[in-house]
Image (cartoon, helix red, strand yellow):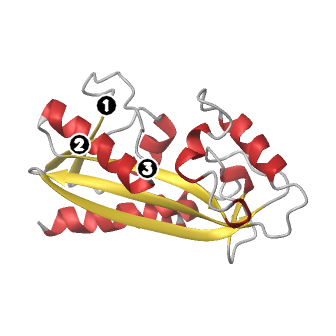
Amino acid sequence: MTKLIFATHNKNKLKEVKSLIPSTIELLSLDDINLLEEIEETASTIEGNALLKAQTIYKQTGINCFADDSGLLVDALDGAPGVYSARYAGDHKNDSDNLEKLLKDLTNKDDRNAHFKTVMALIIDGKEYLFEGIINGTITTQKSGANGFGYDPIFLPYGYTETFAEMSSEIKNVISHRAKAMKQLVEFVNSI
């Protein structure tokens, strides 16, 4: 069985990723290994932040690990919130405040096209690998749905009539940006 640390404290993200991991991979969170400090996301790109987190954990533990970083990129806002998605409304990282700020920033904007992007950075035996998942959609004008987290209540994937927050986790975990990146990572880990 392959053991991997997932560099996160985010329980929602951990739950989502656990549902995507086969039983051939033993998944440990940062809480499971008592690494309680928050890893600063100081890189200027989503790829950079994912790598930074994975490198930090690998250096501290020597255990194979992966980290992700995700962002919502809105066309009318020149790609914002992007790398700052978690702290769009401030360093307190409040999902509700981030949603409200984004909806306010899109007031009177006709172009509501956006995409979610996730990059998974995997470190196996000191070698680094990146996996990317993207899903395109639009930003709704109001929140809808109680599932999910982050920007899920206002993101409507192309070809669907429900926001991520209205969808069942079974559907979201097939089509989401994180699911796409995770599928690539799992296939890679299972191939080595």
Residue 177 in view (yes/no): yes
Residue positioned 56% across, 69% down in the render = 135
Task: Say what amino acid the circle numbered 1 marks.
Answer: Leu
Task: Please name whichever residue, 164 or 79, is drawn nearer the observer in this view of the structure.
Answer: 79
- Say left or right for 31 vs 148: left
Graded by Cα atoms within 10 Å as few (under 14), some (14 to 19) or many (20 or more), the crowding at tag 2 reads many
Q: What's the amino acid at mark 3?
A: Asp
Q: Are marks 2 and 3 in contact (CB under 8 Å)?
A: no
Vertical order, 71 against 191 (above or below): above
Q: Earlier in the sequence, mark 2 or mark 3?
A: 2
- Quarter of the image with the C terminus is bottom left
Indicate left or right for 108 with 63 as reference. right
**Would you say residue 23 is visible in this rendering?**
no
- Sequence order check: which comes first, mark 3 or mark 1? 1
Which residue in the rendered view is the most extreme toward the right?
A: 108
Q: Nearer the viewer, mark 1 or mark 2?
A: 2
Q: Which residue is tagged 2?
A: 55
User: Which tag is nearer the camera, tag 3 or tag 1?
Assistant: 3
Mark 2 lies on a secondary structure that is: helix
Circle 3 is placed at which residue position? 69
Q: Residue at x 25, y 54 (%)?
A: 122
Counting other residues with Cα less than 10 Å from the Cα at mark 3, is it few (<14), some (14-19), or many (20 or more)?
Answer: many
Cα–Cα gap, marks 3 and 1:
15 Å
